[in-house]
């Protein structure tokens, strides 16, 4: 018979927590990395307690599309427009080392953990310029942050498949090393025929390795582009329905309405999902002249109305493509509802889901919930409503991963009397 004192009833007990769509506060009991109980009041001993003081508790954030290998590299080279960025990106990548990529990616993951990102799906360049240097560097950063931020890697042939003869073999090697998805960028190719080869090659590799595809499509906001439609057609032709995501999709916003409707129907028939990247696209795109035209957005509300799952990602941070970003998904949701013209309460809620539950579905991750049985991956906010989360950025918050604190944000205000 042991004389050891019994352990606590709970690993973590959160009191006075608000939940989206619920009026009454609850207590949340966590044990073994999972939410074991949600009730108006929970008793018992706890290894740790958090008094939410009426603040909202939500699922932790998910970023479904982020170029983490390039973060914090803008000091090497920055571009003022997308074509310049495409033309000069390889100059930056040839200077990358595994240790350099690991350290920059780790800085981004520290910010991600602080702001409540529990999962991040990273696009990693795999091409003649960086070969597998970027991939190996991000793998090291991923391993350093295991249990804090879950990082999955998509092997991304930014320099092309036809234009870069080394890319197919490098993609295969990255998949053998554990890449969770195949990326793509058909617009970098020199002809429509080469774009089709690019799309087909990526889909064939993904099918061979049993992984999904997450492809940049209709990136530039030019109505003559047709790569999203090309991707939807190829998805059906290759039997990859439900396994393909189109990213950016900015040209869709400048198509004539009837053409946009036809392409959205094809996206739906292919059971595709869409990831928009409004923060970086708002600055990089929007017309070539002094007067901004389209603001680097897609037809978010029309896609949602059609039944397409849409999520939002951060895309870039202080690199050749984008000069800002601080890895705060609440800020991303705030910018998403602005860029997409999402005005009603329901639409604002959808904007928040685009960085939480919808984003989880996009990358094939378990859909989080503040409910018994779900993983204890949560964010505890000081704000008591969704509008206040977005209105009072950054706001105090605590990030819980696997039932333990892994990061947070503290805020304060001061003014002269």
Image (cartoon, rainbow, N blue to C red):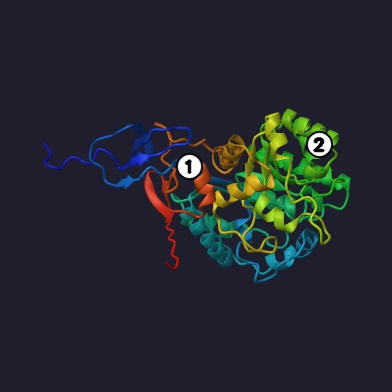
Number of residue marks? 2
Q: Which residue is mark 1?
A: 385
> How many residues crowd around disc 1 within 10 Å: few (fewer than 14), some, or many (20 or more)?
some
Q: Quadrant of the C terminus?
A: bottom left
Horizontal and vertical percent position of residue 244? 69, 37
Q: Secondary structure at mark 1?
A: loop
Q: Residue at x 48, y 33 (%)?
A: 21
Q: Quadrant of the N terminus?
A: top left
Q: Position of residue 314 (x, y in %)?
A: 62, 52
Mark 1 vs mark 2: give the one in front.
1
Foreground residue, 81 or 348? Answer: 348
How far, Cα to Cα, is label 1 from label 2? 35 Å
Label number found at residue 15 = none
Tag 2 secondary structure: helix
Query: Left or right: 398 with respect to 131?
Result: left
Of 205 and 217, which appears nearest the observer? 217
Residue at 75%, 62% in the rendered image: 85
Q: Residues within 10 Å of mark 2 (few under 14, many from 20)?
A: many
Residue ranking furthest to the front:
417
Q: Are marks 1 and 2 in contact (CB under 8 Å)?
A: no
Residue projecting furthest to the top: 269
Q: Nearer the viewer, residue 133 or 6?
A: 6
In the image, taking residue 375 as reference, residue 216 lies left or right, namely: right
Labels 1 and 2: the sequence-earlier one: 2
Task: Give how far across and how far down residue 173 sits, in percent.
Answer: 65, 51
């Amino acid at each position: 018979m042991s004389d050891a004192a019994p352990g606590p009833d709970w690993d973590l007990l959160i009191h006075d927590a608000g939940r989206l769509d619920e009026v009454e506060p609850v207590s949340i009991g966590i044990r073994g990395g999972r939410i074991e109980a949600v009730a108006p009041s929970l008793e018992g001993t706890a290894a740790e307690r958090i008094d939410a003081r009426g603040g909202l508790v939500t699922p932790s954030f998910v970023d479904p599309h982020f170029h983490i290998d390039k973060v914090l590299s803008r000091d090497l080279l920055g571009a003022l427009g997308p074509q310049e960025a495409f033309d000069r990106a390889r100059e930056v990548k040839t200077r990358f080392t595994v240790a350099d990529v690991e350290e920059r990616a780790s800085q981004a993951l520290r910010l991600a953990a602080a702001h409540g990102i529990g999962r991040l799906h990273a696009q990693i360049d795999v091409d003649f310029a960086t070969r597998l240097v970027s991939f190996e560097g991000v793998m090291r950063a991923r391993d350093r942050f295991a249990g804090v931020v879950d990082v999955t890697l998509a092997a991304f042939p930014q320099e092309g498949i036809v234009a870069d003869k080394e890319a197919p073999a490098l993609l295969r090697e990255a998949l053998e090393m554990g890449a969770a998805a195949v990326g793509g960028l058909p617009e970098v190719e020199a002809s429509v025929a080469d774009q089709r080869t690019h799309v087909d090659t990526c889909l064939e590799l993904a099918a061979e390795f049993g992984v999904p595809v997450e492809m940049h499509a209709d990136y530039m906001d030019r109505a003559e582009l047709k790569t999203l439609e090309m991707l939807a057609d190829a998805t059906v032709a290759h039997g990859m329905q439900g396994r393909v995501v189109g990213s950016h999709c900015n040209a869709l916003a400048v198509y004539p309405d009837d053409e946009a409707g036809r392409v959205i129907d094809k996206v739906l028939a292919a059971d595709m999902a869409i990831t928009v990247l409004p923060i970086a696209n708002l600055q990089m795109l929007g017309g070539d002249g002094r007067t901004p035209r389209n603001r680097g957005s897609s037809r978010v509300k029309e896609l949602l109305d059609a039944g397409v799952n849409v999520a939002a990602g951060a895309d870039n941070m202080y690199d050749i493509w984008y000069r800002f970003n601080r890895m705060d998904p609440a800020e991303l949701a705030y910018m998403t509802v602005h860029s997409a013209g999402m005005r009603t309460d329901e639409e604002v809620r959808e904007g928040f889901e685009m960085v939480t539950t919808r984003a989880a579905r996009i990358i094939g991750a378990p859909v989080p919930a503040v409910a018994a049985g779900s993983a204890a991956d949560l964010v505890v906010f000081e704000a008591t409503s969704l509008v206040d989360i977005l209105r009072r950025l950054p706001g105090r918050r605590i990030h819980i991963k696997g039932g333990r604190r892994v990061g947070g944000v503290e805020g304060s205000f001061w003014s002269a009397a």
